[in-house]
Every structure is written in C-alpha cells, then in structure tokens.
Image (spheres, rainbow, N blue to C red):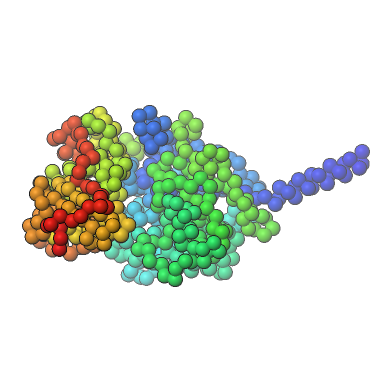
Amino acid sequence: MKHLLIILAALLLLIGTVWAEDLRLDLMWSNDVHGGIDRAQATFMNPEFPPQLGGGASAATLIKQVRGMSDKQRSNLLLDIGDFFQGRPVGTVTKGRAVIEYMNAIGYDAMTIGNHEYDIMEDELINTLQLAKFPILTCNVLDKRTNEIPHYAQPYTIVNRLGLKIGLLGFTTTDTEKMSFPEHIKNVVFLSEKEAVAKYVKILREEEKVDLVIVLGHAGLPYDIVPGYLSRYDNKGNPLADTRYAVWGYDAQEIAREVEGIDIFIGGHMHRGVAQPWIDPVTHTMVIQGYAYGSNLGWITLKVDPKTKTVSGYESPAMREGSMITLFEDQFIPDEDIAPMIQKQVDIAEKGMDEIIGSAGVYLSRTNVDAQSLMGNTIVDAMRHEVNADFAFMNLGGVRADIKSGPVTYRNVFDVMPFDNMVVSFKCSGEFLRRIIETRVEGGRHGMIVSGGKVVYSKKRKNFERVTSLHIAGQPWDPNRIYTVATTDFLMQGNAGLTLLTQVPAEDITNHQVNLRDAIVNYFRKNSPIRTKIDDRWERDDNAQPTKEMIR
C-alpha cells in the first residue's frame, strides 16, 4: 500500500509538472469592425437566405465564455486592430462613440488606430477616443506640432498576465496618407511602419524587459500568402531585391520577416481572415488576422513555457473556422446586458432608414467584371445624372455592399456607401481626361468605374498609351474639347493614386454640396426600378489597336 501511495504521489507530481509547463493565453480580437456591433445578416454566405449574425452582443457572449475558463494557468486579452467605427449607421452617425461605449462595457484591453479613424476631423476623433477606458495605440503617428505621439494615443502598453510581462505595440498603416482627406490629417505625419515597430520592439525587449511582444498592426498579409512571400524572399528568407519599390505601406508579412523580436502579429486592414497563423520561417513570428464588419471574433490560444517565458505553440478553438469564430446569433445568444445597450444606440442612429426610396429590378452586385459591377455602374450613373456631367468615375474600392432585387431603402444605400463622400464636378480638356484614365490602367492597376463613356484599353501597350478607343457622351473623344466630369471629393484630393487631380484649378471645380449617398437615393427615386447592365462602357482588349484619334 505504501509503495502504491508513493507511485500515485509521483504520478500526481508528474501531472502537475506537465501542467505547469503549459500556460495558456487566450488572445481575442476584432479588426475592421466598421461599426458592426449591431445585428446583421450574413449575405456574404447566402445572399437569398442569409444566416443571422449577432454582432457585439454575440461577441460579448463568446468573450465571457472564454474569460470563464481563466484560472492560475490560463488568462486572456481582448484587443482591437483599428477601423472600428466608420461603415454602419451606429458607428458612422455617432462618430464612433457607440462603438467605444460597447468596447468599454465588454472590457477591451487595447486598440490600435486604423486608417478610417481619420475619416472624420481630428477634433471629432479626439472627442471619441477620449471616451475609451483602455489604451489607444500607435507608434508611427506623430503630431507635426510637437513631433511626438499625439496626446490621444501612446506607442505601447504593458500588461501582466500569468506572471508574464506582455508588451502590446500598435501601428497605423502609412496608406492612411493616400486614403484620407488632407484636412483630416493636416496635423499628423505617418512614419515608416517598419522603422517605428523595430524601434519600439527594441525598447520593449531591452528597456522594459517584457517577456512577450504582441503587435497590433493595422496592416495585413498578402492575399496569396506563400506566393507573396516567395516573390519577396528566397528559400532562406533573404530579400530578393536591395530596394523596396512598393508605393503602399509595409504589410504584416514584411514586418514579421524584417523585424526581430515579435511573438505574434495581429493584423487587419485587408478584410480577409486567416484561419491558422502564418509563421515566418526565419523569425518564427506568427501572423493572424480576421474578417471585417463584426462578423467574427478572432481567438487564438498561445501556449507559453513558464520557465523560459517564451511561446511554445498555439491552439485554435475550432476545427472548421480555425481562429475565426463566426458570430451566428443562434450559436452565441446575444448577451442580455450588452444587447439592449447596442440596440438603444442603433434605434437613435437608424431613425428613418427603413423608408423605401425605390426598387431594384435586378440584383445589384458589387462583384467586378474587369472594372464593372452592377452596383458600381449604378453609383457612377447616379453621380453623373445628379450634376448633369458628360462623364463620371470612381475608384474600384468605393463600393461596399450589394442591393438585392426588390424594394430599396435608405439603409440599403447606406450599406453600399457608408462614407460621407461628396459629389464634385470639374471642367477639363479631353487630353487631361485621357490622362486620368491612363493613370488608372498604368502598371498593375485594374481601372476605375465609369459612366458616360466607352473605354477600350490594352495591357500589352506601354503605360500612358494603353487606351486604344475612347468615346465620351456618345461622341468620339476630342483631346481639345472641354468636358464636365463628376467624381467624389475623396478622389479630387488626390487619393487612390490620382494625384494629378490636385492640378485642376480651383475655379474649374464645383462643389455641389450633395452627399454621394443622397445622389444615389435621388437616382433610385427618379429611375426605379433600376436595371443596370454590364455593358460596353469599359473593356479590356489586349489585341486592340488605337483608333486614329488616339494616336498621338
């Protein structure tokens, strides 16, 4: 009996030792919520019979379940990776205040600043961020007036969990400069993501003596992760080029490879979830990111060796979804405390949004066929008709939702165009208009959405000679004619690569004081049922030869 007790004691000691080797840190996160704390239908899964998503209230249920697993060997963090409010009415109308109140209520630990935070004026953003009861992070945004991190943010914060000292470091994509109104970012400058992250990782490791570094980066992995990596690095992880030629900001894959000392990088910005983390083969940094609009909650469990205080592995909670937990309402019953709080804000923000303003005779999809989509074509048609322009255009990324056939409400239009872009028109020569179009098919660019014209181009021709045929307002293009062109104030500021629009003289620009969303509503009111088609307004033909008027 004595020997048996000794054996049992040894086994219990062994079990205890094994358990002690396996600390678990549950990382939960949201990214690119865009105001999606309210209930929504998962039309991206099934447009005709979409499952119901529970939004922030269902996320709260899951968050509380995960927190309920905490003990001496297990703890958790709840984080957000930016673009938290601009997109759905409850976020946009309240300028993010409703989202921050939700995040306070469920207990976020930190959030980084995304590019769409600067869709509003900085003073308005400050008023919203000051409501947060958790740190707002960014290490690469500086106030031009002080050359310091803005007073409403900090580069990093340090938290303690399970006896571990954990550094949370945030950054904001430098793409923000290309995607925001200059007036909104006039007081800030965006530093290189790579240089700023490297600087503060070193501070966290060497000065703060943290055990783990978690980067909250508003940047994402390339769509094709492995080919993307192999196009940049050889099989030993060495860069294939001495100079980086990309015009966009550093993405998550580049920073994970080129900045040592990061344990896990939680990303966003791309609106594309990654079920299992990408692990850099050289630095061994894990990169994970979620989908957008509050459709899911990210959750990954880090396994940490308590002796070395280093990451020894990870676990994903779901076999099918990996680390991306879709917030189906029937699976995660909305939290009874959080749900009414969100609904109260939704009722205020969405007053009058269910008014029927017209109808769609066909399903208006935003899926692009080359540079056309039924929804995109409808938007530029609406823009052109609103100001009686000869030609209209917008960027491919400006269409955010479909509209189903049948009655159309203001809410439907808001989903398509959640941003407060205004319609502007300008006068320009035919030659300048051609340059605009050529700019959008230069290099690897895929064009733009147009109305009032017929564009044929060839990718086999050299840059700025790719447009082979052009008609405007039903007539062959005339390089000397003065055309009236409609677009958005966002593009007139030189965004989406159209810096040449900043050359248009102020006296040739008309600000119509019409929100693009309202122009779309007016178009539905006047022209329903809308039966937009994919037509000959935009065509790629790599065998096309230039018409006589296009030969310079």
Q: Position of residue 2 (x, y in %)?
A: 92, 41
Query: In screen coordinates, is 434 left or right of 78?
Result: left
Please name the residue shown 22% across and 30% down the image.
Answer: 361
Please name the residue shown 12% across and 57% down the image.
Answer: 549
Query: In screen coordinates, is 390 left or right of 286?
Result: left
Please name the residue shown 37% across and 70% down the image.
Answer: 147
Q: Position of residue 421 (x, y in %)?
A: 23, 50
Which of the two residues, 487 or 327, is positioned nearer the viewer here? 487
Which of the two residues, 380 or 1, is positioned nearer the viewer here? 380
Q: Is residue 261 above or below residue 486?
A: below
Q: Quadrant of the C terminus?
A: bottom left
Please name the residue shown 61% across and 44% down the image.
Answer: 70
Q: Position of residue 286 (x, y in %)?
A: 54, 55
Label count reads 0
Q: Position of residue 183 (x, y in %)?
A: 25, 60
Does residue 334 appear in the picture of this structure? Answer: no
Does residue 332 appear in the picture of this structure? Answer: yes
